[in-house]
Image (spheres, rainbow, N blue to C red):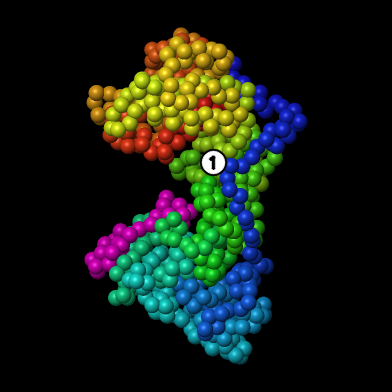
Amino acid sequence: MLKKFAKLFIISPIILLAFTLLTHTTYAEINFERISGDDRVNTAIEISKKGWPNGVSNQEKTVIIARADHPADALSSAGLAGYKNSPILLTFPNQLNSKLETELKRLKAEKVYLLGGEAAISDNVSNRLAAMGMEVERISGDTRYETALAINNKIGNAKDGHALLVNGVTIADALSASGVAATTGLPVYLTTEKSLSVNLPSEVNEVTIIGGTSVISDNILKDLNTQGIKTNRLSGSNRFETNLKVNNHFKFTGNDSILVRGLSSSTNKEDYPDAVAAAGLSSQLGAPVVLTHPTQGQEDIRNYLGARTGSTYVMGGEVAIASVVLNHLNNVFSDDSVTNATVNAKSGVNIRNAPNGTVQGNLSKGTLVEIHDFEGDWAKVRYNGNWGYVHSFYLSIKGDNHLLRGYTIVVDPGHGAHDSGAAANGIKEKDVVLDIGLRLEKKLKSSGANVVMTRRTDVFLTLSERVQVAEKANADTFISVHANANNSEKANGIDTFHYGKYSKTESEELAKSIQKRLIYDTEATDRGTPVGNFHVIRESRMPSVLVETGFITNKAEAEKFKTSAYKESVAEAVYQGIIDFHK
């Protein structure tokens, strides 16, 4: 049977316009508002204006000033900013910026906490502040670790015995901690990777470690446990996943969010110029600090921000966080794109200058991309303002599109009514496969397919009747969904069957496309794509497969079948496999 996918791209401008107008987002719209200045000092001033439009209101009339090109001290002060309800402002070491002076006057500040010793911020700055009539109190230590300890001494060394611990060299996790510290009052302590850099105060009896073992080793955890300190760790596979785990773990009182650049702006050192002053605003708004890649939107971040009801304040200008990131987070893509997708490769995927060409860079898992065309197995995407190519297997198609427009696909959830199919471990096959089938139907329709269900409720059809549904619909593809069973509880995994009576080659190819996606996405045992003499795929004349999505008789897989997440992942993998086949 002739594949028709390629024909979709030979269309008139009028049809293309119609396709564009028909596409709509299913994600909640995120209201973005940028806060930025000409440089990092002025961005901090703009943040101060947003958070304190009428000046500081704390009893001491305090503000915090940290060194602009030294992020560790500013990030360590997040708890102090929350405790004092103070903005965090920035200065360069040797001179007070005139605009900063103006902002201090607008704030009606009377006291300044100056972070760091004279080597960090010179006496020229402190003397100028004093000349302006302000009380200046330095908080410093011989190292960044001791400065953090000194800052925490000002607010109490623990909140109900609890403190946060982050790596003081690779600053990214400190950004994640800053929003929590500012809104909860938890102090932030800094350490190196392999050993504690300071002794934690006796008040601390519980520590939440932010980051994986590559930034804070298990030796530190064991050391704390030996001291009788309870520990827990929040970490992900990268800084962005860690950030979301932190934000989901702690509760924030406000509805707004703060979006900051999560990668250093310098290739030579850790530098986060617009992010370090965000903690003060986080305290004012009760808002989490959310990290993003500066040029790539991430699906998990879109989902997190979309679930919150308030505004998202973006720290910094176009260089800090590109507008394309905000567009993609809002599911807004170019009019001339065919569809959008997310990177599903577990360790990221290379982007090349041509199919099988030279590697230009790498896109991390969850990155949102625009697909403008397909060339065989390669998707043509935008990358840093240029064209790039990504192997399409490592992309998951998302959102409404027309990639399956013109196809009729029959989805056949097995069994039904008095025929429960396999039954074990508290579940019945007929229920599981109907749920998966209905999810698959929705996904296929989002790609423009005409979907025909053999059943949408708990009814029974004979095997011949199921085949007749497909023949009557003149279907292009037939997908029968089942769950497996075996006398041995150890039997496990997924297999996708095909048969050779009709459309032998294409049925086998369809089975392989679906099976490959299922195994990659679910990480189930791969039972292959065997020939199966099942009536529904033997007698159907179009490319036909029967998918056994797991073993109900296996306790571990039965527990997965009970979760919405697993059934969704199976439906998603089958959907992506169908697109791969027709592509």
Q: What quarter of the picture does the C terminus occupy?
A: top right
Q: Position of residue 128 (x, y in %)?
A: 60, 87
In this picture, which residue range is highlighted in magenta?
Answer: 218-245
**Number of numbered discs:** 1
Give the answer, above or below, for where 385 lies relative to 33: above
Q: Along the line of sight, which residue is nearer the eye, 363 or 563?
A: 563
At 65% from the left and 58% from the top, the residue drawn is 318
User: Would you identify the image quadrant in which residue 429 lies?
Assistant: top left
Q: Residue at x 34, y 65 (%)?
A: 207
Mark 1 residue type: Thr
Q: Residues within 10 Å of mark 1 (few under 14, many from 20)?
A: many
At x 44% / y 61%, what residue is drawn?
Answer: 251
Left or right of 28, for residue 549: left
The reply, left or right, for residue 185 in relation to residue 452 is left
Pinpoint residue 259: horizontal percent, then vertical percent.
Answer: 56, 59
> Residue 538 lies in what quarter of the image?
top left
Residue under the point 53% across and 76% down: 86
**Residue 37 against residue 371 in the figure, above or below:** below
Position of residue 85 relative to residue 296, above or below, is below
- Residue pointed to by mark 1: 342
Residue 452 visible in the snapshot: yes
Q: Quadrant of the N terminus?
A: top right
The answer to whether 151 is drawn above or below residue 490 in the figure is: below
Secondary structure found at label 1:
strand
Q: Where on the picture, by quarter, is residue 242?
A: bottom left
In screen coordinates, is 423 left or right of 141? Answer: left
Q: Nearer the viewer, residue 557 or 133?
A: 557
Q: Is residue 244 one of those drawn in magenta?
A: yes
Q: Where residue 7 sits in the image (x, y, percent)?
A: 66, 23
Residue 133 position, x and y percent, is: 60, 90
Find out whether residue 372 is within the magenta segment: no
